Amino acid sequence: MWSQSEVAKFHIRDANEYAATAADSKLLKDFAKHPNLPTSICQVGDVYCTAGKLDESGKLFQHVLKNWPQDEQLIWAKAGLACIDIARGEDAKANTAIDNIIAEYKGHQNLPAAVFRTGEQYWNMALAERRKTFTRPAGRNAQAAPNEKINEYLTGAKGIWERVIKELPSTDTTAKAYQMAAECYILLGQYQKAIENYQTIINNWPNYKAAPHIQYMIGRTYIQLQRAGAITESQAELSIKDAYEKLVANYPDSDRAESALRWLNNYKTKSNEGAEK
């Protein structure tokens, strides 16, 4: 079954509509009795949604709702339908759907992750708009993608991830929500808030899988804070030094430690040269 699911997802990503339709039809027919079929259907539905094939995505999620009303995957189908609402610009409808999911699945182990998934829909839309901005051909009639739309999507993603943080039980998904909300803050130019989010992760989830990268990003974000004119170069360097020293001390075997150590050595050389003058 899983191999057939992968075939369907491959054709969806490849924009081969005929082959994708045939593949997901075969999935539904040949594995109708498989206990994990609802999981597979939801995964294929997510890929359809990401590809912008909203009708096809919705049909699969509705299929799960109709045929497995008691299955644990129901929460993912409902989250998928909320993502479709977001993709269609029906934000109020999506917010109501998310409210209902939170109320209905209180205490469900997958609730934080399911709500987090709806934020990813906004995030993916923001990135798609940014790609249009940087790839659209130049010319007299060319127009850049409106920053207002990008900011709207980033704000939507951040808002949902902040709900995960504030309203739902603390899990590893909470740390991920802090991380992705910080990414939104950076793209929105709110660097200090991004640093605060990153620091919260380090303080509360020091063993989080992305912790070395996040500790590194604290230093990188101080560079952006300085470039924005919010702090001086010397203030930025001291903060970067502190962030990178903690990275090298706490995560010495991480990929980011090498880059941090290189910066620290350069900073030490620069400081020594300045002292000799």
Image (tube, rainbow, N blue to C red):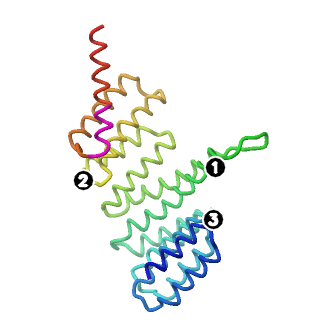
Where residue 8 appears, as percent x and y from the top left, is 53, 76
Residue depth check, mark 3 versus mark 1: number of the one nearer the observer: 1
Compare residues 94 and 37 and report the one nearer the observer: 37
The answer to which of marks 1 and 2 sits earlier in the sequence is 1
Q: Image quadrant of residue 18?
A: bottom right
201 to 101, vertically: above or below: above
Residue range highlighted in magenta: 254-262
In space, the residues marked 1 and 2 are separated at their CA atoms by 37 Å
- Mark 2 against mark 3, which lies toward the viewer? 2
**Residue 267 versus residue 241: which sits nearer the camera?**
267
Q: Residue furthest right?
A: 140
Q: Name the residue under label 3.
A: 88
The residue identified by callout 2 is 207
The residue at 24%/50% (across/down) is 206
The quarter of the rendered structure image containing the N terminus is bottom left
Which residue in the protein does label 1 denote?
132
SS under mark 1? helix
Residue sticking out furthest to the bottom: 33
Amino acid on which the number 1 mark rests in the picture: Lys
The residue at the point 63 percent across, 71 percent down is 16
Check disc 3: other Cα within 10 Å, few if <14, some if 14-19, many if 20+: few
Task: Indicate whether residue 258 is drawn in magenta.
Answer: yes
